[in-house]
Amino acid sequence: MNQSNKKNLEYMKSFGVNYFLTDSPKNWFETKVYNVKSVNNDNHDKEDKIKTIINSINNYESALRNSAKNLVVYDGNLDATVMFIGEAPGKDEDEQGIPFVGRAGQLLNKMLSAIKLKRKEVYITNVINWRPPDNRTPTDEEILAYLPFLQQQIDVVNPNYIFLLGGVATKAILSTPLPLGKLRGKWHEYHSLNLNKKILTIASYHPAFLLRSPQYKRASWEDLQMLEKKLNDKKNFNNFYNIFILQYRYYRKGLFISDCYFRQA
């Protein structure tokens, strides 16, 4: 058996396939060369677009830029399924130029881990990219000024879900005067005109707020579980779809899968 067929069998075995039946003898030593259509990886294109956005933010004249030390734009994966949006950088973020690296960032990491997500798998950013003096809340004018840069990031990453951390992010993205307490615990939709799609969005509490008011952690956990359920549902569907495609490919080669189990992700 050649190495390629051996890998295929091991892959099928990992999905719970017990055995195969074929109508005709199979020459497992035969090596075929298939024309594989090249897939354009748009990751470099995304990197270029993000760099352009970063340059635009850096060149934008504002009082915040003059008072901060470092520009803080994003951390994580440009191909992320989930985008987390906070308020603005704090002291630690301003020092390192990376969002959510202080105490609030450490709590966010634990929140991600609780729903089986890694920081490198998601996209993390803020509404405001410069630290406001004394960590004050950004003004409405500042939010409106930096919102286009955030919207551009959303268009580049093109996530399936947006998780809003705090009232500032919720106000900016959902464009509503309603308080966070009335908006959390349910799904909303962010409308992207450039992507021509609606992105499922959930609003929850900022990790910094949870550190000051731990009694709200239970509500935050409920919001995280809503996201986790969506991700698991999508993962289970993808597993089903992948096995279906795999069955079809083997069927085209004369193989028939007689016993296959679908494992929960």
Image (tube, helix red, strand yellow):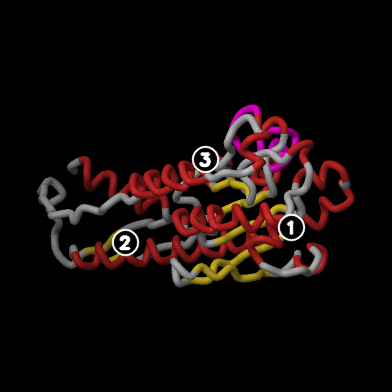
Q: Amino acid type of disc 2?
A: Leu
Mark 3 vs mark 2, foreground winner is: 3
Viewer-proximal residue, 27 or 112? 112
Residue 164, labelled with which disc?
none
Q: To which residue does mark 1 refer? A: 204
Q: Mark 3 packing: few (<14 Cα in 10 Å), some, or many (20+)? A: some
Circle 1: element type: strand
Q: Residue 177: x percent and y percent? A: 76, 68
Q: Amino acid type of disc 1?
A: Ser
Viewer-proximal residue, 202 or 130? 130
Above or below for 85 versus 131: below
Q: Is residue 129 visible?
A: yes
The C terminus lies in quadrant:
bottom right
Q: Residue 123: x percent and y percent? A: 54, 47
Measure the C-alpha gap from mark 2 to mark 1.
39 Å
86 on left or right of 10: right
Residue at image location 87% in from the left, 46% down from the top: 214
Q: Mark 1 touching mark 3, by CB under 8 A? A: no
Measure the C-alpha gap from mark 3 to mark 2.
47 Å
Mark 1 vs mark 3, foreground winner is: 3
Q: Earlier in the sequence, mark 1 or mark 3?
A: 3
Residue at image location 69% in from the left, 49% down from the top: 87
Q: Earlier in the sequence, mark 3 or mark 2?
A: 3
Q: To which residue does mark 2 refer? A: 246
Region in magenta = 95-108
The N terminus lies in quadrant:
top left
Q: Is residue 265 visible?
A: no
Circle 3: element type: helix
Residue at image location 32% in from the left, 65% down from the top: 245
Residue 58, labelled with which disc?
3
Asked which quadrant contains residue 172, the reply is bottom right
